[in-house]
Image (tube, rainbow, N blue to C red):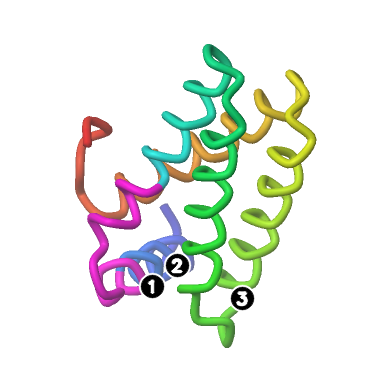
Amino acid sequence: MDGRSEITQHYDRMQISTSGLPHLICLMHHKIVLYIKKYGNTHNRRDIDTAQNLLATLSMSLKEQDHLSVLLQNTYSYCYLLLEECGVEGLSNATEIIEILEDTFSELCGNSKEV
C-alpha cells in the first residue's frame, strides 16, 4: 500500500470517528436496507418513506465543505430517487449501493457487519 492510500484511509477514519455518533451512521445504513427489503415483502409505501427519511437524515448531517461529503450526498440523493420509483431494479440497485456504504462505514468504524 502506498503512502497516499494510507493517508486517505486515515483521513476517512478521522471523518467517521470525529462525527457525532459513528455507530449511528452504520445503524442507519443497516436500517435503510431492512426497510427496503421489508417493502419487497409487504409493498407498504411507509417502508419506502421511512428508508427515504433515513437517507435524507444522513444527507443533511454531512459536512458539505469536503469532497467526500459531496459525493455521499449525491449518492444518497440518487438512492432516494431510486426508492421513489419503487421499481424492482431501482430497489435492487439502491439496496446494493446502501449495503456497500454500510460495509464501508462499518469497516471504517471498526465494527462487524452485525448491527
Find residue 90 and report its horizontal and vertical position in percent: 74, 29
Q: Nearer the viewer, mark 1 or mark 3?
A: 3
Amino acid on which the number 1 mark rests in the picture: Tyr
> Residues in magenta?
14-28
For disc 3, the marked residue is: 67
Q: Nearer the viewer, mark 2 or mark 3?
A: 3
Residue located at (52% from left, 34% from top): 47
Residue located at (33% from left, 67% from top): 16
Dot 3, crowdedness within 10 Å: few (<14), some or many (≥20)? few
For disc 1, the marked residue is: 11
For residue 111, the mark is: none
Dot 2, crowdedness within 10 Å: few (<14), some or many (≥20)? few
Label 1 secondary element: helix
Q: Is residue 106 left or right of residue 37?
A: left
Query: How far apart are the two marked residues, 1 and 2, measured between alpha carbons?
Result: 5 Å
Amino acid on which the number 3 mark rests in the picture: His
Q: Is residue 74 left or right of residue 12?
A: right
Dot 1, crowdedness within 10 Å: few (<14), some or many (≥20)? few
Q: Are marks 1 and 2 in contact (CB under 8 Å)?
A: yes
Above or below, comparing residue 88 to residue 73 in the picture? above
Q: Is residue 33 left or right of residue 21?
A: right
Between 27 and 68, the residue placed more toward the observer is 27
Amino acid on which the number 2 mark rests in the picture: Thr
Mark 1 / mark 3, whichever is N-terminal: 1
Query: How far apart are the two marked residues, 2 and 3, measured between alpha carbons?
Result: 12 Å
For residue 8, the mark is: 2
Q: Is residue 16 magenta?
A: yes
Above or below, comparing residue 18 to residue 2 in the picture? below
Query: How far apart are the two marked residues, 1 and 3, measured between alpha carbons?
Result: 12 Å
